[in-house]
Image: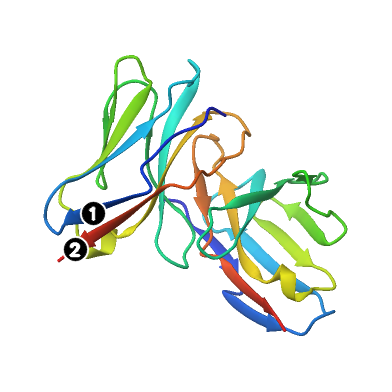
Amino acid sequence: DAKTTQPTSMDCAEGRAANLPCNHSTISGNEYVYWYRQIHSQGPQYIIHGLKNNETNEMASLIITEDRKSSTLILPHATLRDTAVYYCIVRVEGSNYKLTFGKGTLLTVNP
Amino acid sequence: GAVVSQHPSRVICKSGTSVKIECRSLDFQATTMFWYRQFPKKSLMLMATSNEGSKATYEQGVEKDKFLINHASLTLSTLTVTSAHPEDSSFYICSAQTGGREKLFFGSGTQLSVL
């Protein structure tokens, strides 16, 4: 799996949008971008994934650049419960390929 | 999303004993499950890939005789930490892959403390 680079930490005000960047400059054509988050002492939670088109679900939006070398996860209205470590992972969909976790971004939502 | 149940959530045991952790996919069949461990303030590290009906595939550096994995059915995988020692104390997390293999869902984790 291609490596990803994320900032170590970010802060966001409650109610504002949180924009979490991820660089994946060596991504292959068949690799998807996945986002998971982990709240302290819990298992990771799936958020969203995409290949090249922007994606949106009830949790977040995923914006992937045209060259697919980077992406941004957007939490439109961050709440205190969104404080977590967010992991950006690239993986081939439809395979048994494992998810390899990097260090992720610790997002702290402040009141 | 799909539900993965992991049990127990917390276990404390004496050094030298064995501990079994169960991972169940509640509303889907999982031909592949993954086991991770996580030390405090660190990221998840993959230990092994568990395929239903076959032997698990262990990552480099993980002792297969110490961490026994059984995946006897499409909804259950177990991890047994044999002859546990204090250095095995960690947060263990399982994940299960949906049938379409597009997503992995994770259990809530097991905090193992070996005294």
- Label disc, if present, on residue A28 of the rendered structure: none
- Label disc, if present, on residue A110 of the rendered structure: 2
Mark 1 belongs to chain: A
Image location (x, y in percent) of residue A82: 28, 58
Image location (x, y in percent) of residue B29: 60, 48
Above or below, B43 relative to B97: below
In the displayed structure image, the side of residue B69 where residue A29 appears, left or right:
left
As drawn, which residue projects farthest toward the front?
A8
* Residue drawn at x 81%, y 75% as measured from the top left: B18
Quadrant in which the N terminus of chain A appears: top right
Image location (x, y in percent) of residue B11: 64, 79
User: On the image, numbered disc 1 is attached to which residue?
Assistant: A11
Compute the Cα span from label 2 to label 1.
Answer: 7 Å
Mark 2 belongs to chain: A
What kind of element bears circle 2? strand
- The answer to which quarter of the image holds residue B60 is top right
Of B32 and B93, which appears nearest the observer? B93
